Amino acid sequence: MKCVNNEIRRQDRVLNEEEALDLLAQTEYGILSMIDENGLPYGIPVNHVWDKQNSIYIHCAPEGKKLRAIKHHPNVSFCVVGRTNVLPKYFTTEYESAVFFGTARAQLDEEEKMKALHLLIDKLSPEFKELGDTYAHKSFNRVEIIRIDIESFSGKAKTAKQVRKSY
């Protein structure tokens, strides 16, 4: 995975690969941004799971705008935002975020699709794995999985310590 942090103006705030991937693993949702079939920008918040290798999985309906968009323009970005904290006294915000760039595809084989559903259950409903498995099998044909193969990332964070240091 290629790091594109060199494009960030404030190099003192960049996240390394481990920090960015940890943020991807821990966040509940992210914003999937793409170009729709009409060439217009389209971004939507979605639940996700990272496979701890090189892919992000997202579940959706078996048809819709996301699927039409990636069919026409498979290059996407996926933004996650972790902890934030407004610091009114300093007129700024503590934050941590990362953007992952990659290629999206759907119509995965059945084995990978079920694996992705189980990864989502493990992340989002860990105390209901058995029920989740039953639900995944029952709804298998009514759900689609999008896989984003991560090619590069950029991440940044600002802490209160950095803010106080600049005042």
Image (tube, rainbow, N blue to C red):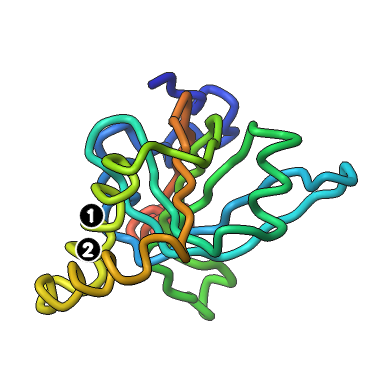
Q: Nearer the viewer, residue 52 or 84?
A: 52
Q: Nearer the viewer, residue 49 or 70?
A: 70
Q: Which residue is mark 2?
A: 123
Residue at (52, 51) in percent of width and height:
79
Q: Amino acid at mark 1?
A: Leu
Q: How many marks?
A: 2
User: Residue 165 in the image: x percent, y percent?
Assistant: 39, 54
Mark 1–mark 2 contact, CB under 8 Å? yes
Q: In which quadrant will I find the N terminus?
A: top left
Q: Is residue 1 left or right of residue 69?
A: left
Mark 1 lies on a secondary structure that is helix
User: Residue 152 in the image: x percent, y percent?
Assistant: 47, 26
Q: Is residue 85 left or right of residue 54?
A: right
Residue at (18, 67) in percent of width and height:
133
Query: Residue 120 occupies which quadrant of the picture?
Result: bottom left
Q: Is residue 125 left or right of residue 32?
A: left
Residue at (55, 64) in percent of width and height:
61
Task: Judge the density around disc 2: few (<14), some (14-19), many (≥20) Cα neighbours within 10 Å.
Answer: some
96 shown above or below 137: above
Question: How many angstroms separate mark 1 from mark 2 (CA)?
Answer: 6 Å
Query: Residue 7 occupies which quadrant of the picture?
Result: top right
The single residue placed furthest to the right in the displayed view is 38
Q: Nearer the viewer, residue 149 or 118?
A: 118
Q: Which residue is mark 1?
A: 119
User: Residue 145 in the image: x percent, y percent?
Assistant: 45, 51
